[in-house]
Image (cartoon, grey):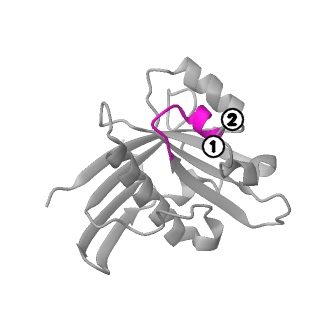
Amino acid sequence: MESDVFLIKWYGPFGSQEMVKEWEDKHNSIRCSLYLLHGKLKYAKTKEKYYCGMSIRNIYKRLGDKGHHIEEIKDRLNSIYVGSLSNIKRPLRQQILLAEKIITANLTDIVGKSSVLNATNTYFPSEDVFVINEWWKTTCESVWERQPKNAPSNIIPDVLAYHFKGKDDFELFGCKKLKRLW
């Protein structure tokens, strides 16, 4: 059985859709097809919400679609991260969906289904998937060393190794934060 391996370079955090648009216009050579949203519902006191999505066009346009989940947290948006499958030159839709699925399923597992706005893709896939997440600053010059506790970059593990053994039989390994050795 063949395994899928993804190196996802996440850029952010952005504080608005307009900031994402400016960044995408400036960095049009970076092909982003994933995004993470983090914020609170309009009248929520403390409950944080997360959303992982994908797009085959630019992220800014996807976030502007009618009925998009960003509308639920737009007034109290904490952050937007955009992600690029950097080890694949032209990722196929199926690969993007698989990367989204493993991130969403893991996020749901960590924060709970009630904290994730995704209605689909909350279950782990039926194939092996390996993901390395890197959290880059919007300048694209360095990675984040520290982020707030509730930020997606602090919740989603830097390394995920998912092994599918059969129906209802799988294992997930993760490394919360990679540490610099040198």
Q: Amino acid at mark 1?
A: Ile
Can see residue 45?
yes
Dots 1, 2 in contact, CB < 8 A? yes
Can see residue 157?
no
**Could you say whether the residue bearing mark 1 is in a helix, strand or loop?**
strand
**Depicted 145 relative to depicted 148: above or below:** above
* Residue 13 shown left or right of residue 130 in the figure: right
Q: Which residue is mark 2?
A: 17
**Depicted 172 relative to depicted 98: above or below:** below
Q: Residue at x 63, y 40 (%)?
A: 63
Q: Residue at x 16, y 56 (%)?
A: 2
**Which of the image's four quarters has the N terminus?**
bottom left
Q: Amino acid at mark 2?
A: Gln
* Residue 84: x %, y % from top left: 43, 37
**Could you say whether the residue bearing mark 2 is in a helix, strand or loop?**
helix
Q: Which residues are magenta?
A: 54-63
Q: Residues within 10 Å of mark 1 (few under 14, many from 20)?
A: many
The circle on residue 80 is 1
- Which one is in front, 154 or 81? 81
Mark 1 or mark 2, earlier in chain: 2
* Residue 125: x %, y % from top left: 34, 65
* Residue 164 shown left or right of residue 19 in the figure: left
Choose mark 1 or mark 2, whichever is in front: 2
Q: Is residue 114 magenta?
A: no
- Which one is in front, 63 or 26? 63
